[in-house]
Amino acid sequence: MRASGEVVRLPDRGRAPPDFRTFFEEEQAALLKMLHFVTGDRSDAADLAQEAFLRVWERWDRIETIEDPRAYLFRIALNGWRMRARAARRAAARAIPALVVRDPFEDADVREDTRRMLLKLSQRQRAALVLVDQYGYRSEEAGRILGIRPSTVRALATQGRAVLRSTGGPDA
């Protein structure tokens, strides 16, 4: 209704106009307005409207088979908006890593605790554990570095882990 109380009649939207140009002229303003409300951005609304009209124009030869061309146009535009929003969320999730704030004082405490635990081990156990568990060497490589057999490296590492567990260290 208008301010004067007069009822505004919308044109019949149930059937397609005779040509695409007429359809475009009749629907452009309404589609842009709706998309502007949905997106909150005039530029995004214009881009989405253009894409939606292009998709309708590509299918214009089959438009008579569509019950409500206006609803079809609006659905295409809203689907485009949803696809953009999903893509933006996925891109943001990939681009913004979880922010981990490290406390340098806590890192120092962990280093000191680790040093104290390792000092409870013999030098050979400590060397075997550091090479195998900290640096990821296989027992064969660690044995070559230490000048001992791989089986001795495995035994020393196992003994060192047992001492750490008994004193309340890792894996306790």
Image (spheres, rainbow, N blue to C red):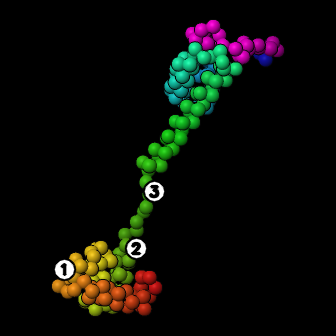
- 76 magenta-colored: no
**Amino acid carrying mark 2 in the image:** Glu
Which residue has dot 3 on it? Answer: 98
- Residue 37, quarter of picture: top right
**Amino acid carrying mark 1 in the image:** Ile
Q: Nearer the viewer, mark 3 or mark 2?
A: 3
Residue at 30% x, 73% y: name it.
136
Answer yes or no: is residue 36 visible. no
Q: Above or below — where is 130 with respect to 35?
A: below
Read off the magenta span.
3-26
Considering depth in this image, is 66 or 21 the residue closer to the camera?
A: 66
Q: Above or below — where is 88 with respect to 58?
A: below
x and y, in percent, of residue 95 in the image: 42, 48
Residue at 35% x, 87% y: name it.
158
Mark 1 or mark 3: whose residue is earlier in sequence? 3
Point out which mark residue 145 bears.
1
x and y, in percent, of residue 163 in the image: 38, 91
Q: Above or below — where is 89 with respect to 56?
A: below
Residue at 19% x, 83% y: name it.
146
Considering depth in this image, is 63 or 21 the residue closer to the camera?
A: 63
